[in-house]
Image (cartoon, helix red, strand yellow):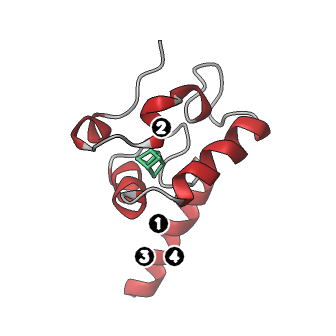
């Protein structure tokens, strides 16, 4: 069973709830490329994308695709934000 973050419990029907296996792979930090690309495409049309990425960054989620971003992409975004605040 694949579990998605608590954040998503409060969201209406997001694409990741329909196909969670594309977003989280329990055997690896980042889903394999075909699933990853499909997840990113679904995130691109999601209306809570920014809030989802923020949740993942703020809560230190170290796996999966959230807000259309892998963990390394979320780390990069977080670093850019820190630099922009300086
Ligand atoms: S941005 Fe992606 S992971 Fe986040 S709620 Fe939307 S579909 Fe799910």
Q: Looking at the picture, tell me which residue is in the foreground, 57 or 45.
A: 45
Q: Are marks 4 and 1 in contact (CB under 8 Å)?
A: yes
Element at badge 1? Answer: helix
* Whether residue 65 is situated above or below residue 43 in the rendered picture: above
- Residue designated by label 3: 82
- Residue designated by label 1: 78
**Residue 31 horizontal side relative to residue 80, left or right:** right
Image location of residue 83, percent across then percent down: 47, 82
Image location of residue 1, percent across then percent down: 47, 11
Element at badge 2? Answer: helix
For marks 3 and 4, give the CA distance: 5 Å
Bin the neighbour count of mark 4 within 10 Å (Cα to Cα): few under 14, some 14-19, many 20 and up.
few
Q: Looking at the picture, tell me which residue is in the foreground, 34 or 56.
A: 34
Q: Residue shown at 42%/59% (left/top)?
A: 49
Residue 85: name its quadrant: bottom left
Label number found at residue 16 = 2
Bin the neighbour count of mark 2 within 10 Å (Cα to Cα): few under 14, some 14-19, many 20 and up.
some
State which mark lies toward you, 4 or 2. 2
Q: Looking at the picture, tell me which residue is in the foreground, 64 or 45.
A: 45
């Amino acid at each position: 069973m694949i579990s998605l973050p608590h954040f998503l419990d409060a969201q209406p029907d997001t694409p990741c709830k329909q196909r969670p296996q594309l977003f989280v792979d329990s055997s690896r930090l980042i889903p394999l490329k075909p699933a990853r690309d499909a997840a990113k495409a679904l995130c691109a049309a999601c209306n809570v994308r920014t809030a989802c990425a923020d949740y993942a960054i703020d809560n230190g989620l170290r796996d999966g695709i959230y807000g259309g971003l892998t963990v390394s992409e979320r780390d990069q975004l977080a670093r850019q934000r820190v630099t922009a605040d300086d």
